[in-house]
């Protein structure tokens, strides 16, 4: 059996999945939350059962050991399901990593060197890689970077118009994020509409708590809405997205906001949360429907920004667009957000089928009318599976 262990080590959590690559089925999954001081929570799912435990988990090494204990106690046994490789999510690969990479000490050092570009994420990702390499010493470890899919974005779209020396010295450019999801969804969308991935032109709407859009042309990313960091672009659960940078000078000079205050304001207290008091789209849409003015205004800004990018990405895809594919928490589940974003665009060849849009399903599906020149799709994302696929691909291992 070829199983791949996928590890997503975040700043205060460790997520894992064990995937059987012959069937691409998830065998088991788990999450260790609140790594650090205080009581952590470990959840392990296997064989339709969920095992939860509360205990202090002070480091990523301990979280990794807890994961091993979970497999030993609750199954499946890693002796009978020994992974052929471990795939690790890493957020920032900079201009150094253009695809999945087999880890050695040099790769570890290079990820470390990229920490200033993604301080919270890369450090935690690396801690997971290090913990895993200590335990699984005899199998390849592969890092799959969120930014790698976007390294194909042309310079004209990824450069910021600032002083060249400053940009180069501090590596300031658009790196994007959610690349693993965008690639997976674009490939699944191409399959769904029966166009080879190497020819398909798709706009992927990854709309979750974090949200970004991506124009994918012939299997490669040509534009994405997140920037040097995941703050740029769309309105998100707690992030502002695009903003005139001079707002920051103004808040600093007039209101005495420090750099940390501004970081906190824009990354954690803005977006839907800042505008409506909640970052859960279910609450926002329900309140808006009941006539709540704040919720309606917040939703209107949220939708307006997506339409703004949609217009831009239809331009970025030279020669036409085959499909618009919705994914992630909001994209997969909110018929209201999909309808409001795409309404009145029949003149562009975008025609949503209201009944299909309202129908709940966990399957990838078409939600536009047969007349719609650009097909509208819902494609549930699966970043872990994409990481596992890329891990096998780069190691040259075949599912057996
Ligand atoms: P992330 O991975 O960025 O944390 P997710 O992709 O899991 O986020 O999306 C989470 C968000 O999806 C929630 O904050 C919620 O707003 C939204 N969401 C989940 N289910 C629904 C639903 N049925 N209707 C509308 N929004 C939903």
Image (spheres, rainbow, N blue to C red):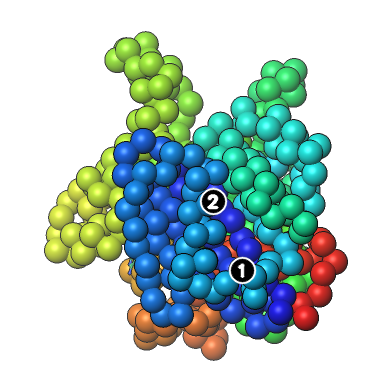
Marks 2/1: CA–CA distance: 14 Å
Residue 278 in view of the camera: yes
Q: Which quadrant of the frame does ligand 1 lie within?
A: bottom left
259 or 116: which is nearer to us? 116
Q: Quadrant of residue 52?
A: bottom left
Q: Which residue is mark 1?
A: 78
| Image side of residue 228 versus residue 10, left or right | right
- Which one is in front, 102 or 84? 84
Residue 186: horizontal and vertical position, in percent?
A: 64, 68
Image location of residue 191, percent across then percent down: 68, 80
Q: From what the image shows, is residue 380 above or below residue 130? A: below
Considering the image in quadrants, where does the N terminus appear? bottom right
Number of marks present in the image shown: 2
- Figure quadrant of residue 193: bottom right
Q: Is residue 267 left or right of residue 75?
A: left
Q: Quadrant of residue 44?
A: bottom left
Residue pictured at 63% horizontal, 58% vertical: 180
| Quadrant placement of the C terminus | bottom right
Q: 79 above or below 86? A: below
The residue carrying pointer 1 sits among few (fewer than 14), some (14 to 19) or many (20 or more) residues within 10 Å by Cα, namely few
Name the residue located 21 percent from the left edge and 64 percent from the top edge. 286
Can residue 190 be seen by looking at this rendering? no
Q: Which mark is residue 64?
A: 2
Local SS, label 1: loop
């Amino acid at each position: 059996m070829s199983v791949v262990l996928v590890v997503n080590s975040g700043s205060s959590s460790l997520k894992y999945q064990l995937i059987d690559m012959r069937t691409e089925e998830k065998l088991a999954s788990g999450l260790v939350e609140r790594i650090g001081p205080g009581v952590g929570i470990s959840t392990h799912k296997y064989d339709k059962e969920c095992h939860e435990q509360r205990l202090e988990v002070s480091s990523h090494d301990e979280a990794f050991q807890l994961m091993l204990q979970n497999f030993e106690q609750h199954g499946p046994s890693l002796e009978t399901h020994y992974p052929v490789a471990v795939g690790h999510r890493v957020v920032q690969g900079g201009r150094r990593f253009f695809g999945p990479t087999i880890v050695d000490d040099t790769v570890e050092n290079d990820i470390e060197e990229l920490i200033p570009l993604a301080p919270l994420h890369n450090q935690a990702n690396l801690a997971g890689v290090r913990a895993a390499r200590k335990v699984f010493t005899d199998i390849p470890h592969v890092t799959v970077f969120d930014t790698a899919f976007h390294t194909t974005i042309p310079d004209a779209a990824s450069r910021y118009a600032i002083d060249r020396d400053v940009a180069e010295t501090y590596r300031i450019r658009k790196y994007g994020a959610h690349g693993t999801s965008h690639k997976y969804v674009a490939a699944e969308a191409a399959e769904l509409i029966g166009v080879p991935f190497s020819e398909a032109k798709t706009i992927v709407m990854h709309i979750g708590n974090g949200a970004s859009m991506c124009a994918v042309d012939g299997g490669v990313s040509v534009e994405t809405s997140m920037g040097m960091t995941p703050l740029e672009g769309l309105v998100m659960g707690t992030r502002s997205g695009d903003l005139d940078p001079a707002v920051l000078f103004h808040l600093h000079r007039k209101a005495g906001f420090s750099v940390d205050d501004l970081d906190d304001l824009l990354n954690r207290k803005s977006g839907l949360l800042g505008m409506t008091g909640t970052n859960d789209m279910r609450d926002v849409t329900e309140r808006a429907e009941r006539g709540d003015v704040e919720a309606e205004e917040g939703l209107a800004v949220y939708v307006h920004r997506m339409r703004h990018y949609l217009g831009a990405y239809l331009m970025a895809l030279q020669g036409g667009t085959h499909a618009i594919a919705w994914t992630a928490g909001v994209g997969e589940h909110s018929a209201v957000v999909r309808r409001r974003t795409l309404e009145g665009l029949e003149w562009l060849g975008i025609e949503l089928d209201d009944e299909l849009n309202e129908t709940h399903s966990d399957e990838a599906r078409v939600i536009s009318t047969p007349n719609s020149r650009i097909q509208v799709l819902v494609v549930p994302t699966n970043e872990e599976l994409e990481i596992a696929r890329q891990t096998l691909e780069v190691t040259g291992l075949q599912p057996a």
